[in-house]
Image (spheres, rainbow, N blue to C red):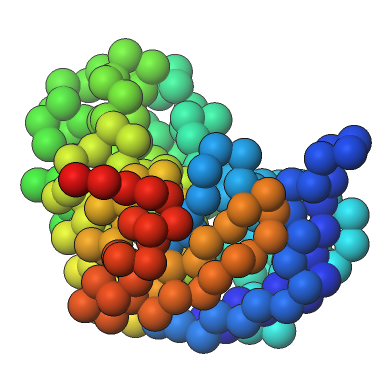
Amino acid sequence: MEIKIHNLKKTYGSKTAVDISDYTLQGPEILGLMGNNGAGKTTLFRLMLDLLKADSGNVCLDGTDVSQCEDWKSHVGAYMDESFLIDYLTPEEYFQFCGRMYGFDAATLHERIYRYERFLGDEILKEKKYIRNLSAGNKQKTGIVTALLHNPELVILDEPFNFLDPTSQSLLKHYCEEQKATILVSSHNLSHTVDLSTRIVLLEQGHLLRDLDNTDGAAGTELENYFEVKE
């Protein structure tokens, strides 16, 4: 999927949250979006998902302006935070709810869920807890798997490593390779992002500072210098 950003701006009062003139990403790719707190990572993702209205400019997915049409939504999966979940449902009920939206029959839904059985684990699949009573990590796992259920061409995940160990990296790498998908991941965790991403974009105060090729972790040293990471 091709992602094109053109003259995209979003401000809150005097604060610039996002100001990106032009950027194009042609997948499949795993793009790590990095920056300190307040850099604009979450705002950019929300603009891409049409969850926020831009002050100017646009985001186009395969030539479709996300703010003008909803056809792109069937090709995109996302998990931003717990607000994407329905916490008074169990994970099974939530998966069934989402499966009905995608038009899955019972067999298809079962297959899509249980391909991630090892990642999800027993607390999610067997204990029938309400989502509100799951651990933070298992809430995050539920959201990530739901984002992948319909085999989207583009996956957007905000801080997916907050409560998860590095096994989530192998899940996303496998998904990208198997589905030829583009995955966008925001993170402030340098090591996880370098290990996972094929490209890394660095944001500062809403501006795109660098777009780095990360083949074989090539961007690691430059990012360490930028963030002044010391052993």
| Residue 157 sits above or below residue 90 on the image | below
Residue 188: which quarter of the image?
top left
149 left or right, relative to 5: left
Q: Position of residue 16 (x, y in %)?
A: 80, 47
Q: Position of residue 22 (x, y in %)?
A: 73, 78
Q: Position of residue 96 (x, y in %)?
A: 37, 41
Image point 62% across, 53% down: which residue?
Answer: 204
| Residue 230 sits above or below residue 72 on the image | above
Q: Position of residue 153 (x, y in %)?
A: 45, 73
132 left or right, relative to 191: right
191 left or right, relative to 206: left
Residue at the top extreme, as displayed: 133
Residue 74 in view in this figure: no
Image point 55% across, 38% down: which residue?
Answer: 37
* Label total for image: 0
Image point 90% across, 36% down: which residue?
Answer: 13
- Foreground pick, 51 / 91: 51
Residue 123 in view in this figure: yes
Quarter holding the C terminus is top left
- Foreground pick, 197 / 90: 197
| Residue 124 sits above or below residue 71 on the image | above
Residue 136: which quarter of the image?
top left
- Foreground pick, 38 / 46: 38
122 left or right, relative to 185: left
